[in-house]
Amino acid sequence: MIAGRPFDFVVMAALLRQGRRADAISAGLAALAALWLLAASLHTMATPVAVLLAASLALYLWQAYCATRTALDAELLQALATTPAGDDPAATLDASLCALGLQAADRGGRDWAARWRGARGWLRRQLVATAGQAVLLGLAGGWAVVHGGTG
């Protein structure tokens, strides 16, 4: 694949913007876990349930960080799609990130294949964290059902 063409940026930005759905789902799962912990603090809660809910909330924080990185990459790639012909989009991006202190100078010059992998990696981490939240909430629910909410 010839990388770095304007439409490549548009396509990758569109893919990364799909992370907004995972972010919304993750926020909902975190709200559920937080409400469950809050409601259960009034009663006796099994320690395993509390640990699973707390771990789910920790995964939400990681997911939120990944979502921020994913959204930033999407915005940057969308902006690069409008880079004037003749300008080197990679050099433009690297110069801006370095000038703003968002990238170390030695990180510049990567090829587009490496950049695509990095951007997709943040989206993948975000999706895995969201799935992990769902699994932990399911395990907490299963434990509470099997053990009657106490342990």
Image: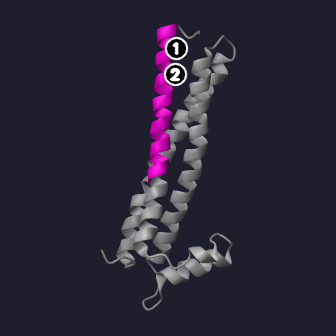
For image coordinates 67% across by 78% down, the residue present is: 99
Circle 2 sits on which residue? 140
How crowded is the residue under tag 2: few (<14 C-alpha within 10 Å), some, or many (20+)?
A: many
Q: CA distance from mark 2 to mark 1?
A: 6 Å
For image coordinates 51% across by 58% down, the residue present is: 70
Which quadrant holds residue 128? top left
- Looking at the picture, how far across and down is residue 53, in whole percent? 58, 27
For image coordinates 51% across by 64% down, the residue present is: 73
Q: Are marks 2 and 1 in contact (CB under 8 Å)?
A: yes
| SS at mark 1 in the image | helix
Which quadrant holds residue 10? bottom left
Name the side, left or right, on which 85 lies relative to 147.
left
Q: Which amino acid type corresponds to the residue marked 1 in the rendered image?
A: Ala
- Looking at the picture, how far across and down is residue 88, in whole percent? 47, 86
Classify 108 as above or below 11: below
Classify 80 as above or below 147: below
Main SS, magenta region, reads helix
Name the side, left or right, on which 11 lies relative to 76.
left
Circle 1 sits on which residue? 144
Residue range of the region highlighted in magenta in the rendering: 124-147
